[in-house]
Image: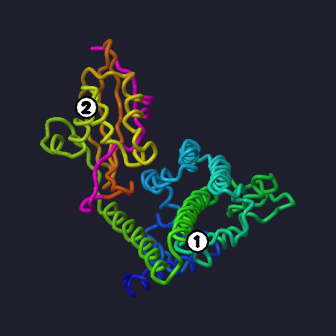
Amino acid sequence: MISKKKMRELADTVDAFYQLLGDKHWIFHDRLSLAAVRTIHASAGGDADRAEQLLIERYHDPERLALMLLPLRKLPAMRRRLDLVDKARQDYFDGRFYSTVHVLLSVMDGFVNEFETVRRGLHARKPEELHAWDSVVGHHLGLAHAHKTFTKGRSATQEEPAFELYRNGIVHGSILNYDNITVATKAFNRLLAVVDWAVAREKEQRHQAEEPVTWSSVGRQLKETLGAITEQAEADRANKQWKPAEYRPGSKEFTDHPLYQQTHELLTWWKRRNYGSLSGLMTHDLHNKYGKSVRSEVRRAFEPFPLDDFEICAVRHDMAAAGTVLAVLAHSGGKRVSAELRWARENAQARPCPEPMPGQWRLVFQPRVFLDRATSLPAE
């Protein structure tokens, strides 16, 4: 059973979050850790504007936002839209906030339209349809509450700066001055909340089919939700304490590093054309996406680029649960390319797991990504 102390801790933290930021229509989702929210609350000292600024800074961190977005891959209807999400993320960090907002609004509408058999986008949903019985986004000041401004009509043209995610006014061209980091960040916040809602809906439907809703089943779902938030808090603590490091050839730390060892193993399997073993080093997301056909997908990606030799040039361990390995790949015909291989330390649910949490280093991107982005080098 979940302890009363942990339940109280969760409830108090979520309530404190909404006390400060509920009127600004920010939503607590399970990719926000309890520790991070407590830090924001303590640092803001009751100032909602300051709390909002601190929350935006948390999103406006390239690595942290990338990790927040990893669970999107688990939902097929969202997986189809990941290329658009990635473009919106790039626009966000390049300062094209207007583009981020429009792209993410279209992603949310399309995802919700496809997610359920009832074909209606997010903008066509009533607030009561967005309650999530076993998720923190189901708070009375959460997703359903924020949805009221999302769909609010705006007939008169408004040129004053807007800082809310007024979907209808933005899409229909009546709200003009929304090109700012606040609205863009709220678009990412809403996207993650909608994903939480979708996961909760799937669980609800599954449990309704399997068993009647009882206090026992509700308690189990709450325990799962708290477990995910606690896990995220533990990962955030590790990231906060982490100090980035880069290792180069010639040091024991370089060859002893697990990222060097994993990369050496991956490239060795590639050189030997052992695509079955190679596929075992790919992220769980790839396995979840392709299932038993993952080996075939990996073969199709790597086989056109036979590897003759390789050299691992650097290991950049830039986050507790993520790192990049730089390598030079020599292909047939004397072609040499410089490639970056991005790795994440994750558990079986593809959640980031820094040490000492149990996890494995796996290649984050789908196989073709680092091949497509590789830079050609002159032949030796």
Q: Position of residue 57 (x, y in %)?
A: 50, 61
Q: CA distance from mark 1 to mark 2?
A: 45 Å
Q: Nearer the viewer, residue 24 or 149?
A: 149
> Hey, what amino acid is under mark 2?
Trp
Residue at (34%, 49%) from the top-left corner?
344
Q: Is residue 321 above or below residue 330?
A: below
Q: Is residue 254 magenta?
A: no
Residue that lies at the very extreme toward the right in this rendered image: 156
Q: Is residue 373 magenta?
A: yes
Tag on residue 50?
Answer: none
Assess disc 2: are there few (<14), some (14-19) or many (≥20) residues with their C-alpha within 10 Å of its C-alpha: some
Secondary structure category for the residue under label 2: helix
Residue at (50%, 59%) from the top-left corner?
59
Region of the chain picked out in magenta, as a range: 354-380
Describe residue 180's horizontal placement relative to residue 51 as left or right.
right
Q: Position of residue 239 (x, y in %)?
A: 34, 60
Quadrant in the picture for the N terminus: bottom left
Tag on residue 132?
Answer: 1
Assess disc 1: are there few (<14), some (14-19) or many (≥20) residues with their C-alpha within 10 Å of its C-alpha: many
Q: Position of residue 133 (x, y in %)?
A: 56, 75
Residue corresponding to mark 2:
269
